[in-house]
Amino acid sequence: SAVSCCLQDEVVSRLLLPAKHFAPVELEVLRDSSEVASSLSFVKEKQLSVVISAPRCFIDRTGLGFLPVKDGLQYPVFDNQIILLGDSTLPEVNLLLPYTAASASSASQSRASRGHASYVQCSIDVPALGGFSHTTAITQDRCFSLCMNTEKIDPAETGGVLSRVVSLLPEYIISNFLHNTIYYRQYGTQGPAIEVKPNSSYPVYWSSADLPFAFQFRPGTTEGYAWSGPIIASEEFAGQNWLVLYNGISNSTPGVFDVEVCPDHGVKSVSLRHSGEASGGYVVINKCKALQKVMVHTYHYEMAVSNSSSGNLRPGSESDGAPKVPDFDFHFFAHYGESIHFGWPFPFTYPSRPCQVLLWIDSRTVAPKKPIALDLRVPQHKRYEVSLGLRNMPRIIVRTEKRGDCVVIEVRSKPGTGDLASPDDVADSSGEDLTSMHLAINMAELGISLISESLRQELCFAELSQVALGFQQKGERQKLLIRLADIQIDNQLANAQKP
């Protein structure tokens, strides 16, 4: 009777189907053959047909076993993983996690609480199609940060009707692309340290809900690496971040790692790679035979200011014989013919990316008297010429530039100076800096239309008569121009009903 009542009113109707011992689920009734005729061969457009479907299906992709509930009743489960949800007019859904599963697993932020001794319960907003929301579920010793997103199921899989899958996922995921095992823990805690094996991924859960959601890692247990600084997986740090780790083994060089943050539909994935196996990065290249090595010193302005304001005290500088702690600035050395990656210790904490360059002629002689100071936060083409002040020694060219995804500091001899210039040096130098460049991109009459699938009409239309992007470079000076002309936005919802 409920279905027949719905059919008399509208083409598309929704009803709640009660079930014994389960929460009522929502079904959608479609009375329009043209909507499904293209997907179902046995349905003709002129036939009277009724299609009953589930507009929202819930799937727990966390592996923890969360169940949606309504007034203490669970929704029915199909195929051991698909759960139909209830009334779509309610913005929230309650999630229940059996406490045995929570303990074994060792945003619009929603409320989360410990409801009963045998389970953990929280609530989360069900997002609209294409959206996402966040919540946390808290146990006695663990905080689970969760993400829910809503995606459309391919109409070919649903007989042409509109159906959505509501997925529950971990909000943070760490992927280990190193050749050895890594360990991670929540920053500011002593653990537990979670193991992530090579070429595998693991959800990031937290020891405390009262601390920021940031973690730190270290490769293996025998490599000598210290724990990293905090890693904050957020949209602000999307992309590659170049982090350096102190190595306590004698004469070991610091480790440089590519920490790539990829936000996608509310889920933040963090991938860890060694700098030598990642694309891009910060690289110092030594092409000068006259030098023993080139040194790059990285640090953070903010930490230097903090140290000076506290009486120039550095960690580990006490004279009480305490063991030395990792440095907060690092030195990287490139001998002739080498390309060395470098990075910063706290790229997620401090925005500055300063470094200093020194040229080592031998173990006792360096040039220039004051290190070349560079700010690589916004890479620019720069060129410095250094005179070593020694007979028969060439003048040294130090230049910085962006090459593809790499920011390069290159050191080479100036052609025609000194006695150490080789044909290779001269030939290499023929491709000197690009000193002048002009790039312009123009687009005319660009239109953008936003169409609602549920309303079956256009919501908004934006039109730009001109979009122009220009880039100019002359020597060390760079200029970026962006021009938007005649922007017009039409709101088509003025006389329409809201969904």
Image: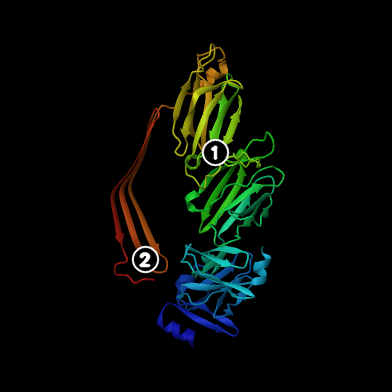
Q: Measuring from the top left, give residue 168's x and y in whole percent.
A: 56, 65
Nearest the viewer among 29 and 324 is 324
Which mark is first along the chain, 2 or 1?
1
Q: Is residue 269 above or below residue 476?
A: below
Residue holding disc 2: 457
Which mark is on residue 64?
none
Q: Is residue 194 above or below residue 257?
A: below
Disc 2 is placed on an element classified as: strand
Circle 1 Cα neighbour tier, 10 Å, few/some/many (<14 / 14–19 / ≥20): many
Instruction: Tell me what residue is drawn at x 59 percent, y 33 percent.
Output: 332
Looking at numbered disc 1 in the image, what kind of residue is underneath it? Gly
Where's the C terminus, which quadrant? Answer: bottom left
Q: How many marks?
A: 2
In the image, residue 110 lies at what x, y percent? 50, 68
Residue 486, compared with residue 369, is above or below; it is below
Image location of residue 170, percent across then percent down: 58, 61
The residue that label 1 is drawn on is 281
Q: Name the colour scheme.
A: rainbow
